[in-house]
């Protein structure tokens, strides 16, 4: 039996690698590091099927150093220590450190991650971790501080079309078949930016036809094949990204029935309860926000409860939080506000803090005018006094825009009373 198409087409060099141009394109940070022949430890964070494992293998091949692979699903502390011991024996002074690639590093326990610290710090191994989860939540701080973090993105339409073209022209099996790619919409839609999923779909559609039969790929044919084989394009449980997306969109859309359905799908599928609870906390801030500030409190309480009681009872606080968020009024004004502020910071750089807002712990700072003229709000009626808080170059910029839900309207009216025309 031949290898799967996705494995046969796995790139061997950076020039064959598709996507992630912000990291491996000409002059990009990872390409420069690789071409220099020396890399530091880093973590690749991105959705499935975007090339994390492939990139690690290309780096090891390019640097010509020992390459060790561990899976966080099947490896323990002993496996980590064994690899580190072997790496110490194989390393020569003038050679780059051996590479230790850990797939799904977010599944490593704290003790497993602790066992890596010394080796990474001393340079015994160069760690490349791959994760589909936010490392801030899943990777211990000491290890995270010793690694660069690079974010990989879902593949764009042009990337996916390039991959399809390469598969049909270069794969040793497909290039011998008569295949016409008449329509690509369904394949791109079902792949969701995941290269492996796209190739699985292509392989499924082609294999369903007889060897001597021409294959004309249309959207209708793809949909028909996937309905007959609902899991064929979604191997290794990757569907949970689609389901969590449906779950959050149902909450955002104020449909408690749909939200509970997708919650049940995740529970029945054995999803990690922390994964669900974390998304509820994010949704409480991003989608409900200031329209109902209690939502964040309840989501946090559900997170704590799930951590304490686990399955199966954990389904109950998760369901309570799900229904509460779905039925709450919605506002994303805080989410939009902080994104607008980040964009402003990136556009304007490090603007100086106005002197009257600066801290003045020393006599020299006071003599320079730090803190001079600052008005302490609690010394004024209503605990408010108008003064400048933004940098001089940004005075007058509006970043938060109220969305006038009943709860948020009170906040807006308070700002009108304080600032008047600025908030009209």
Image (spheres, rainbow, N blue to C red):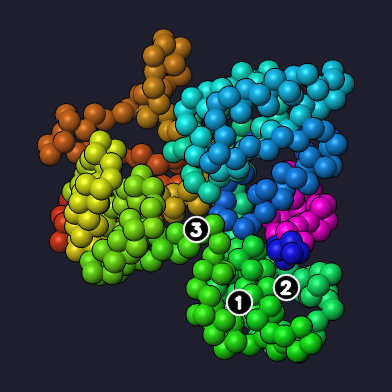
Q: Residue furthest top?
A: 363
Relative side of 74 to 334, left or right: right
The span shown in magenta is 7-32
| Secondary-structure class at tag 1 | helix
Q: Earlier in the sequence, mark 1 or mark 2?
A: 2
- Whole-percent x, y for residue 8 in the image: 77, 61
Q: CA separation, marks 3 and 1? A: 19 Å
Around disc 2, counting alpha carbons within 10 Å, would you say few (fewer than 14), some (14 to 19), or many (20 or more)? many
Vertical relation: 186 (above or below) 139: below
Q: Which mark is residue 187?
A: 1
| Residue ID for mark 3 | 237
Vertical relation: 83 (above or below) 276: above
Q: CA separation, marks 1 and 2? A: 10 Å
Q: Which mark is residue 114?
A: none
Please name the residue shown 63% across and 57% down the image: 50
Q: Are marks 1 and 2 in contact (CB under 8 Å)?
A: yes
Vertical relation: 404 (above or below) 139: below
Can residue 124 be seen from the camera position used here? no
Classify the position of the N terminus by image quarter. Answer: bottom right
Around disc 3, counting alpha carbons within 10 Å, would you say few (fewer than 14), some (14 to 19), or many (20 or more)? few
Relative side of 268 to 11, left or right: left
Q: Which mark is residue 164?
A: 2
Q: Nearer the viewer, mark 3 or mark 2?
A: 3
Q: CA separation, marks 3 and 2? A: 23 Å
Please name the residue shown 45% across and 59% down the image: 240
């Amino acid at each position: 039996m031949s290898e799967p198409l996705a494995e046969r087409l796995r790139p061997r060099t950076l020039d064959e690698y598709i996507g992630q141009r912000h990291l491996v394109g000409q002059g990009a940070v990872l390409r420069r590091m690789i071409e220099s022949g020396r890399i530091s430890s880093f973590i690749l964070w991105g959705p499935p099927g975007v090339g994390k494992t492939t990139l690690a293998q290309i780096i090891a091949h390019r640097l010509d150093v020992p390459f060790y692979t561990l899976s966080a699903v099947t490896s323990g502390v002993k496996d980590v220590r064994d690899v580190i011991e072997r790496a110490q024996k194989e390393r020569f002074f003038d050679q780059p450190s051996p590479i230790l690639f850990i797939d799904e590093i977010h599944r490593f326990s704290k003790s497993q991650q602790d066992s890596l610290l010394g080796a990474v710090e001393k340079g015994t191994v160069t760690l490349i971790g791959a994760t589909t989860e936010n490392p801030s939540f899943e990777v211990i701080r000491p290890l995270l501080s010793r690694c660069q973090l690079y974010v990989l993105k879902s593949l764009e339409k042009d990337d996916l079309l390039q991959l399809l073209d390469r598969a049909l022209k270069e794969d040793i099996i497909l290039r011998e078949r008569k295949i016409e790619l008449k329509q690509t919409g369904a394949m791109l839609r079902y792949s969701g930016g995941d290269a492996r999923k796209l190739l699985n779909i292509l392989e499924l559609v082609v294999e369903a036809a007889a060897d001597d039969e021409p294959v004309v790929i249309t959207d209708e044919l793809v949909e028909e094949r996937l309905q007959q084989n609902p899991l064929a394009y979604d191997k290794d449980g990757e569907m949970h990204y689609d389901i969590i997306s449906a779950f959050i969109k149902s909450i955002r859309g104020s449909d408690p029935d749909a939200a509970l359905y997708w919650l049940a799908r995740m529970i029945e599928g054995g999803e990690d309860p922390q994964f669900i609870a974390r998304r509820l906390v994010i949704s409480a801030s991003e989608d409900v926000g200031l329209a109902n500030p209690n939502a964040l409190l309840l989501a946090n309480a559900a997170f704590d409860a799930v951590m304490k009681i686990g399955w199966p009872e954990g389904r109950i606080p998760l369901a309570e939080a799900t229904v509460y968020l779905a039925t709450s009024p919605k506002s994303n004004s805080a989410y939009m506000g902080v994104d607008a502020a980040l964009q402003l910071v990136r556009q304007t750089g490090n603007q100086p803090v106005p002197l009257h807002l600066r801290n003045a712990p020393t006599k020299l700072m006071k003599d320079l005018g730090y803190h001079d003229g600052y008005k302490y709000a609690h010394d004024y009626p209503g605990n408010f006094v108008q003064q400048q808080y933004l940098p001089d170059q940004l005075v007058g910029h509006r970043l938060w825009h109220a969305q006038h839900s009943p709860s948020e309207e009170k906040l807006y009216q308070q700002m009108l009373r304080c600032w008047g025309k600025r908030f009209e």
